[in-house]
Amino acid sequence: MNDSILETILNLTKPRTQAAEVYYLAGQDTPIEFENNRLKSLQTKATQGVALRVIRNGRLGFASSTDLTRLEDLVEAAIQTSDIGSPAEFEFAANFHSWDGAVNLPNPARRHQPATQAELVDLGHALIHQVHDYNPDILVDVSFHLYDRTVRIATSQDVYAERTSQTTSVGLSGNLVRGEDFLQASSFDVARDASPDYDRVLQELLRKYRWAEESASIRSGLFPVLFLPRAAAITFGSLFTTVLSGQSVVQKASPLTDKVGQTLFDSRLTLFEDPQVGVNACSFDDEGTPTSRKAYIEGGTVMGFYWDRRWAARAERSTTGNGFRGGLSRPAPGVVNYCIAPGSTATENLIAQMDEGLIVDQVLGAGQSNQLAGEFSVNLDLGYKVENGKVVGRVKNTMVAGSLFEAFQHLVDLGDSPEWIGGRAYMPSLAFAQLGVAARQV
């Protein structure tokens, strides 16, 4: 798609609307998948489409399409929906131009050359063989994704912005069946304009199996609990992003609504967003607003919230550049990279300090929780018992529950080696002095 199509859409809307915003998304995904030790599929999928928002007679209209040969129909659909659309409480972005297809690259003219499909097939076989060197009974799955993405946005208020990204991801997982016991473990990495750390992914998977070689049990009660980075991101990331959303604030659903300036957490907790780094780095959001680094919790003190244009207008605030879309949908408040500042203690030392406790490595889904109250309850997909500072084996049928506020009032420390989790979170290990543990004895 060339830029003339965005211009054509804006020109078609101009005589019939007060303002318009065109959002274009294109992506090409090449998945290479191994299942149960064998190559399963290798294909390329490409998608593209346009989403159009208009303001007409003071109301919002919206339409989207993946058929770029019928632009008049797209414009007509957006105009028709404005007849029943919600009042336009905000203005579209204005006076902004950006191209950030080479964020953080020292030489923007030189792009990373990703591995070929043949090279990744060979790498998949090699990873499977290395897992089998540890235990040939593990059924191994490997998935690679080569993904190219382009976003363009233009408005009738003199905005044109473009960003491109090229990412490669690898997922490595295994299933070990021992009688009626199924032990599933996984690891993952993704890189932008670079190769994932394939060896780290392999070593992480093998470490999980080594720690789970023996079985262990823990009784129900209050225990020290250590969340490794991935489990910490899944358990706490969605809770923080929910209660810090401007939408939750406007709806008076966030427990932090009137707590700005108050210290509610341990002074070592600093949670911030930095859209200029990492796999998903971007200089503008999906509404054409510049992004910026911002702290939401600093030294345990609540500093503020994140806003898209719609919810910011309702709160009589300004957007913070946090309007993002899922595909060709309308924008909603979202966070690019949520980061927790690391602590000063190595993860192995956090383990060594535990007399009797639990390590949470993998959780089932996002857990059951009352997110708007900051509460969590997660079932362990993979967890380990610690005795006298040593990992003694895997625990099963175990749940950990608590709340953000109680957990971070019992913070032992944060690990000193944060990890990127799925390219969207930068998270250290989190050690808590006590959380509720429920264990079902079999």
Image (spheres, grey):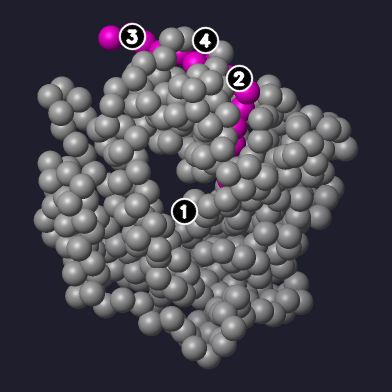
Instruction: Determine crowd level at label 2: few under 14, some 14-19, many 20+ residues with C-alpha closer than 10 A.
Output: many
Q: What's the amino acid at mark 2?
A: Gln
- On whether residue 291 falls in the magenta region, the answer is no
If the image is split into quadrants, where does the N terminus sit? bottom left
Camera-side residue of 19 and 193: 193
Which residue is tagged 3?
Answer: 441
CA distance for labels 2 and 1: 28 Å
Which residue is tagged 4?
Answer: 221
Which residue is tagged 1?
Answer: 422
CA distance for labels 4 and 1: 32 Å
Q: Secondary structure at mark 4?
A: strand
At which x and y percent is residue 238? 57, 39
Q: Eyeballing the image, is 335 above or below 46? A: above
Q: What's the amino acid at mark 3?
A: Gln
Question: Mark 3, mark 1: which one is toward the viewer?
Answer: 3
CA distance for labels 3 and 1: 34 Å
CA distance for labels 4 and 3: 13 Å
Q: What's the amino acid at mark 1?
A: Gly
Q: What's the amino acid at mark 4?
A: Gly
Q: For the view shown, which residue lies furthest in the bottom direction? A: 109
Of pointers 2 and 1, the one earlier in the residue sequence: 1
Q: Quadrant of residue 43?
A: bottom left
If the image is split into quadrants, where does the C terminus sit? top left
**Segment tinted magenta in the rendering:** 428-442
Q: Eyeballing the image, is 173 above or below 435? A: below
At which x and y percent is residue 373? 65, 24
Q: Quadrant of residue 382?
A: top left
At which x and y percent is residue 313? 78, 50
Instruction: Determine crowd level at label 3: few under 14, some 14-19, many 20+ residues with C-alpha closer than 10 A.
Output: few
Q: Please report the residue visible at 51 percent of the width from the left and 75 percent of the height from the top.
A: 164
Q: For the view shown, which residue lies furthest in the right direction? A: 261
